[in-house]
């Protein structure tokens, strides 16, 4: 895997920034990484876009991801005329790319590439009691992409969340494990 580019679409408060940062921090110095968000002065619930690059070679690009390998949509309600159109979400994603969507049921989209769904909201609500789907969404990405091995990221997650109450840590680990195994390929 020479270079991977990821674009995450979410609402503020759903953890896309944290998910991208956790992914690159789990990689450490093994590869060259970059993560940065794009948002205005919005508050919780407003649309957020996060860009991630992972490469074997030094990164020289410091602009938003234009041709992603993976696009991750945290919230289907973002797809409306007032916030985002599907064309905005899949922009630059070609037929070899992969779209991962947080959705409870199958859906039909006008996109010819790989499409997966994961009920990240349901998993996060059941395992941690809050609609913060970032851990399940990272798990889905890792299961599909192989960017990071499951055990390596789980170990990172244990260290990163060690200051949280045991109940929260265990809930996140369960959410990660479940999500890794509860992905559905739509096409």
Image (cartoon, helix red, strand yellow):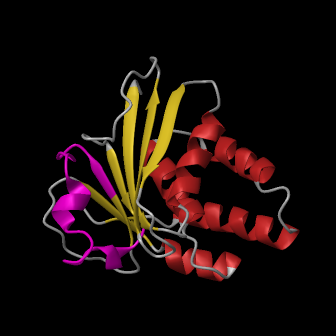
Q: Which residues are magenta?
A: 74-99
Of residues 6 and 177, which is closer to you in this image? 6
Residue at position x 80%, y 48% in the image: 159
User: Residue 19 sits in which quadrant?
Assistant: bottom right
Residue at position x 86%, y 68% in the image: 165
The correct choice, above or below, for 73 with respect to 82 in the image is above
| Residue 167 pos. (x, y %) | 83, 73
Q: For this view, does 87 lie left or right of residue 71?
A: left
Q: Is residue 154 magenta?
A: no
Of residues 70 and 35, which is closer to you in this image? 35
Of residues 105 and 9, which is closer to you in this image? 9
Location of the C terminus by quadrant is: bottom left
| Residue 14 pos. (x, y %) | 53, 69
- Looking at this view, name the residue that lies furthest to the front: 41
Q: Is residue 80 magenta?
A: yes
Number of callouts: 0
Q: For this view, does 50 lie left or right of residue 163?
A: left
Residue at position x 36%, y 27% in the image: 61
Location of the N terminus by quadrant is: top left
| Residue 147 pos. (x, y %) | 49, 38
| Residue 15 pos. (x, y %) | 55, 63
Q: For this view, does 145 lie left or right of residue 152?
A: left
Residue at position x 19%, y 74% in the image: 108
The correct choice, above or below, for 127 with respect to 98 in the image is below
Q: Main secondary structure of the magenta part?
A: loop
């Amino acid at each position: 895997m020479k270079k991977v580019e990821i674009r995450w679409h979410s609402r503020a408060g759903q953890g896309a920034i944290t998910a991208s940062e956790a992914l690159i921090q789990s990689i450490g110095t093994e590869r060259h990484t970059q993560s940065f968000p794009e948002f205005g002065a919005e508050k919780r619930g407003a649309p957020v876009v996060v860009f991630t690059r992972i490469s074997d070679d030094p990164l020289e690009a410091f602009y938003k991801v234009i041709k992603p390998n993976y696009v991750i949509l945290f919230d289907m309600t973002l797809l409306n005329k007032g916030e985002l159109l599907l064309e905005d979400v899949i922009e630059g994603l070609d037929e070899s790319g992969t779209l991962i969507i947080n959705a409870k049921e199958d859906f039909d989209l006008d996109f010819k590439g790989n499409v997966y769904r994961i009920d990240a909201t349901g998993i996060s609500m059941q395992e941690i009691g809050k609609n913060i789907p970032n851990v399940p969404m990272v798990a889905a990405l890792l299961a599909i992409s192989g960017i990071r091995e499951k055990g390596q990221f789980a170990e990172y997650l244990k260290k990163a969340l060690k200051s949280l109450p045991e109940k929260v840590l265990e809930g996140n680990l369960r959410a990660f494990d479940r999500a890794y195994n509860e992905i559905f390929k739509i096409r």
